[in-house]
Amino acid sequence: MRKEQHHKGWNEIKTNDSWALFKIMGEFVNGFERMSVIGPCVSIFGSARTKENQKYYKLATNIAKSIAEAGYGVITGGGPGIMEAGNRGANLAGGVSVGLNIDLPFEQHDNPYIDGDKSLDFDYFFVRKVMFVKYSQGFVVMPGGFGTLDELFEAITLIQTNKIEKFPIILVGTDFWKGLMEWIKTTMLDAKNISPEDLDLIHLVDTEEEVVDIIDAFYKGRALSPNF
């Protein structure tokens, strides 16, 4: 009897997984259709816990404003903290302000600086990550937590393995990122687990001017298009 109950429960799980595919497909279709018409954008990542009076919130706002003034839209995860700062800066410059929202039990709520027609909601992290990677001309990575690191290393891995086109990855905040970069360049590189060229597109900066200069220099003479 117990064995029969066990198999019944397992079959219910398999059925639920199969039906979930339609919801996943729906999120991909909606994301592709809406993002494909937005135009060239730069994604800004960072902590949802950063407060408005902290320096990295202010810097992220200025960076996003400069990016928008340079002709790019800004994509964020749509929530508070650095995400809000990114959308806020784009909004101040009159630029495209996109929010890719995720349903979370804490931290996440839509910020008020996203364009009304450019706020997308996702249940699945992996679908949302595809949208960031596919429609970004660059990643600007502010100080953050595990989610920020997840997005950072996802992009590096996809570029390293030639799954997507190369684009600039810009770490903002020398004090925050230098320890990680030193470890990558010594421990990881010395162990020959990566190649020196894997680090070529990672830049460590502290100002909005440096961010825009790197993006503009990379795309000078290049066509702007989705990454895969």
Image (spheres, helix red, strand yellow):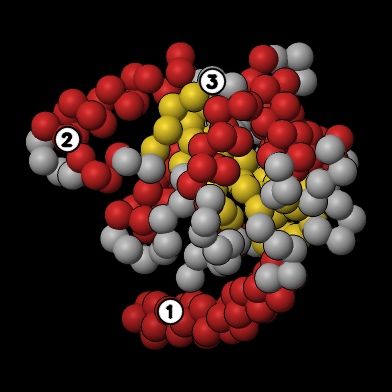
Residue hosting label 3:
206
Residue placed under numbered mark 2 in the picture: 189
User: What residue is shown at x 72% (from left), y 27% (from top)?
Assistant: 62
Q: Mark 2, mark 3: which one is toward the viewer?
A: 3
Count numbered badges in the picture: 3
Rate crowding at label 2 as few (under 14), some (14 to 19) or many (20 or more) other CA atoms within 10 Å.
Answer: some
Mark 1, residue position:
10
Q: Amino acid at mark 1?
A: Trp
- Give the amino acid type for the residue marked by disc 2 in the picture: Leu
Q: Residues within 10 Å of mark 3 (few under 14, many from 20)?
A: some
Q: Is residue 188 left or right of residue 91?
A: left
- Residue 68 higher or lower than 59, as above or below: below
- Nearer the observer: mark 2 or 1; the answer is 2
- Marks 2 and 1 sit apart, C-alpha to C-alpha, by 44 Å
Q: Earlier in the sequence, mark 3 or mark 1?
A: 1
Front in this rendered view, residue 58 or 18: 58
Residue 114 image position (x, y, % from top left): 83, 47
Q: Is residue 81 at least partly visible in the picture? A: no
Give the class, few, some or many, for how many residues have Cα within 10 Å of label 1's Cα (few <14, many ≥20).
few
- Horizontal and vertical percent position of residue 39: 70, 62
**Quadrant assignment for the N terminus:** bottom left
